[in-house]
Amino acid sequence: MHIQRALPIGLICFFVLAVAACAPMVQYYPQMNELMVHQDYDAALELHRKHKLNFGKRNEVLYYLDEGLLAHFAGRYAESNESFTTAERLMEDLYTRSISQAAASFLINDNTMAYRGEDFESALVNMFMALNYVGLGQWEDALVEARKVDSKLTTFNVQYPAGKKNVYKEDAFIRFIMGILYESAGEENDAFISFRQSEQIYRQDYRANYGVSAPEMVIEKLIESAKSMGFSSELGQIRNAYPAVSRRKPPHIGNSAEVYLLDYNGRGAEKVERFFFIPMPDRYVLKFAYPEFEKRPFSVAGCRIDLKNTQTGQQYTTRTVLAEDLSSIAQLNLKNRIGRIQAKAVARVTAKYLLAKEAEKKALRDGDKDLAKIIRFTFQTYMIAFENADVRHWRLLPAQIQVARAVIPAGDYQGVIQLLDNKGNSLGTRPLASFSIQENEKKLIPFRTME
Amino acid sequence: MKIPRNGSTLLLMGLVVLICSCATGPKVQRMGADSTVDVSGRWNDADSRMVAEEMIQDCLERPWVDNFRAAHGQKVPAVVVGSVKNRSSEHINVQTFIKNLERALLNSGRVRFVASKGEREEIREERLDMAHHASEETMKGPGQEYGADFMLIGTINSIRDEVKGTAVMYYQVNLELVSLENNVKSWIGEKQIKKLITRPSFSW
């Protein structure tokens, strides 16, 4: 009788829990990645949109982040901004944590909480939006995004005081991009501040934490900017700190234009589940699960870009350098708070275990051995099946962003991108969409390499 | 598997179905266009309206129109709207308060407005089209445009200070009327808006 009564209720609870504890179903991502390898971003975007329902309410931030990024890769900048704007608003709304979801996360797992994005993901949203606006020729709007990200990074800085174990609180690459945007709009002082912050973050944070030093172009821009502002003492300090770059002839000649080629390289690190079992003396088995970022291999170590002025026939060559190691940022960001995640998992598993034992004991006290068996079986299944790590993350982010800078005369250009491995061997070539550039103009041209 | 049809099971299943199916459509409530509703704390219609009201009142009260008319034989000054740069950290549509200002000044009868740069291009295109397709009696010829005496330019600046769910947002809108004859600034209008935005840390 007890079994008959308990079984359907248990099944329904199981079903409700299963729905509540689910991460988004992303089985179609390998297919999407395949389309991206072939640079068919339109098809990848279409495929992603077909699976919108897989994400549900709790994971809709993730849906819009990937939708925005796919549209960005496809050069559909207006659509990309629509998605990113939605993602950003959702992330802001999720600042307010749901007590019911938090309680459920203690009973089931962290997947019951709405995904609200990491700090670095939130900052990247504005950077991609800024690049979208540049692509649309809306520089004033691009600068709005620059100011937004400036404000965000300042807020992160205040949130995590100095001395606290490293967390993502600044972004050298985004500061650099913002400097370029400010400079394009003639806001020289803001540009100088951004370049200076970028250099400082590379020196004080990125080099130690991610092994990424300031690319030479950052120092070159800082020198140019300090000169244009007439900041002689700052100029002296930079020259002392970077004598090799200072000695070199500055690349900026007359009214030349500047092209920045951004390579979104490799597949970003993937958050995977790590778990272990602990058998208890009373034959219960406890499962502990936690997330970990695993870097994914990629072959492209850099790119050589050859630009040809179609009017003069003159060739210009530039190479990309590493400016942002997103996989390492993601990895370290998670590593720094894994202690909290693991402590919560231990508390949750212990609570479930004690609850199971208590319920089983009560059934035995009541002399109902069958019910006790059901309770043990149900709780054991529940503890194993639902103790899952929260492995949600912005899946389509590249592993890294590399940048090349070319200072070229105004004109019409055609280009070829040569993909190189870590020994400098060619992995293939790819045409760069032809472009025109005016005197003193700046262009930011993104492309994606996934090989 | 045979599921017994007792009351509690059915009740529980019903509850699950009810929870799953309780999505509702949008709820619409009409309100006065001049009511102030702050939803997100971002720049909204109320801010735009406040800026327009302040600017209109200030612009009409100042002596620049009378000064101009006295110096130009009672000629009504003509104004063209130039660029209003958004230097804030939000995407702000400046056209909303610029159009309010334009309408109020024009309706006061003390100022004329000439079409802005973008509008003029469209009108010139139409005139060119007229030259090909309209009858001679009705077509409008070139060289008859009314030249503006002043240009309206401006900026929107913002400062955001935020820590843990509490933000202070400060906007400053500046509009200036610059004489096209001699670059003299004849009027400067300014409106500041400050908001305290708090977001709760927890909700149900």
Image (cartoon, helix red, strand yellow):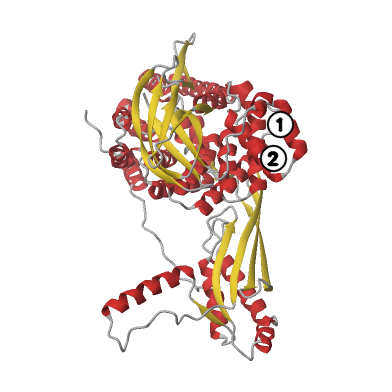
Quadrant in the picture for the N terminus of chain A: top left
For the residue pair B139 and B35, the one nearer the viewer reads as B139
Q: Position of residue A307 (x, y in %)?
A: 42, 34
Please identify the residue farthest to the top as the structure is shown. A281
Q: Is residue B73 above or below residue A74?
A: below
Please identify the residue farthest to the right as the structure is shown. A233
Q: Could you tell whether B114 is left or right of B166 in the image?
A: left
Amino acid type shown at disc 2:
Ala
Q: For mark 1, what is the residue? A: A238
> How many numbered dots are placed on residues in this image?
2
Q: Are marks 1 and 2 in contact (CB under 8 Å)?
A: yes
Q: Element under label 2?
A: helix
Chain letter for the residue marked with disc 1 in the picture: A
Amino acid type shown at disc 1:
Ile
* Quarter-of-image position of residue A382: top left
Please identify the residue farthest to the left as the structure is shown. B1
For the residue pair A1 and B132, the one nearer the viewer reads as B132
Query: Are the residues flagged by discs 1 and 2 from a single subunit?
Result: yes
Chain letter for the residue marked with disc 2 in the picture: A
Q: Is residue A193 visible?
A: no
Q: Is residue B20 visible?
A: yes
For the residue pair B76 and A368, the one nearer the viewer reads as B76
Question: Residue at left 45%, top 48%?
Answer: A86
Q: Could you tell whether A109 is left or right of B192 in the image?
A: left
Q: CA distance from mark 1 to mark 2?
A: 9 Å
Q: Is residue A22 above or below residue B147?
A: above
* Dot 1 crowding, Cα within 10 Å, few <14, some 14–19, many 20+: many
Q: Element under label 1?
A: helix
Disc ID at residue A226? 2
Question: Residue at left 61%, top 65%?
Answer: B154
Question: Residue at left 60%, top 49%?
Answer: B199
Disc ID at residue B63? none
